[in-house]
Image (cartoon, coloured by chain):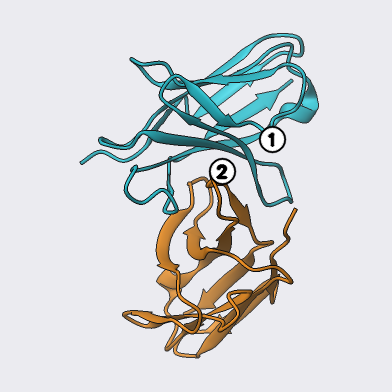
Amino acid sequence: NAGVMQNPRHLVRRRGQEARLRCSPMKGHSHVYWYRQLPEEGLKFMVYLQKENIIDESGMPKERFSAEFPKEGPSILRIQQVVRGDSAAYFCASSPPWRVTEAFFGQGTRLTVV
Amino acid sequence: TQLLEQSPQFLSIQEGENLTVYCNSSSVFSSLQWYRQEPGEGPVLLVTVVTGGEVKKLKRLTFQFGDARKDSSLHITAAQPGDTGLYLCAGDEGGATNKLIFGTGTLLAVQP
């Protein structure tokens, strides 16, 4: 029973490039969440998705960030034109529809912008 | 936005000692989770508490949800070096969003 899978684990991008972070939820989980953990800060909610729908994106920066969870395939968090301030650990979590309040986290993608 | 304050921020103790970590808010949560996070890894869910006054035990760990569902505590008995890590509480705001509000974290180091 595989857990939440995120890839890549580490990602280095130059300023101005695009970063794509992938997340495959646990089997049977239809709810996906993205969180960001900045250095010396706590985990902050970014976006909540169900298959083909964005339910809550109140934590997403207004520009350059987007997320999707297509009918087939993993959820993608996309950051366009990255800046140094985007350097952080990005965590994906999933939960089953019968227990949406319990989130199981992946190992995260550590994004470094140089 | 609701805030969750954890105390203490840092705790360094000897193996075998007991400790308590607190998680406080001025707001009410539908449920509250406790996670442990190790360096370079994602948070691992330890427990979910839902009912005010609820107490849950997980081996040497005891979790309590306050009667008013605004605060929670985690008590560890006879701490071991394997308990070392960052402990995070997270509250569910309820409603349709299901998003978690994470606490500020308590970094625990258990010395052998």
Mark carried by residue A76: none
Report whether mark 1 lies on the same chain as mark 2: no
Kind of residue sitting beneath label 2: Thr
The residue where tag 2 is placed is: B97
SS class of the residue under badge 2? loop
Q: Are marks 1 and 2 in contact (CB under 8 Å)?
A: yes
Seen from the viewer's position, the closer of residues B9 and A34 is: A34
Where residue A84 appears, as percent x and y from the top left, is 78, 25
Q: Is residue A21 above or below residue B47?
A: above
Chain identifier of the residue bearing label 2 in the image? B
Give chain B's shade.
Answer: orange
SS class of the residue under badge 1? loop
Residue under the image location 73 percent in, 61 percent down:
B3
Give the image quarter of residue A82: top right
Seen from the viewer's position, the closer of residues B5 and B16 is: B5
Residue under the image location 42 percent in, 88 percent down:
B78
Residue A68 as seen in the image, left or right of residue B59: right
Residue under the image location 62 percent in, 76 percent down:
B71
Q: Residues within 10 Å of mark 2 (few under 14, many from 20)?
A: some
Q: Is residue A10 above or below residue A73?
A: below
Give chain A's shade.
Answer: cyan
Kind of residue sitting beneath label 1: Ser
Where residue A5 appears, as percent x and y from the top left, is 37, 32
Mark carried by residue A58: 1
**How many numbered discs?**
2
Q: Is residue B60 above or below residue B41?
A: below
Q: Residues within 10 Å of mark 1 (few under 14, many from 20)?
A: few
Give the image quarter of residue B62: bottom left
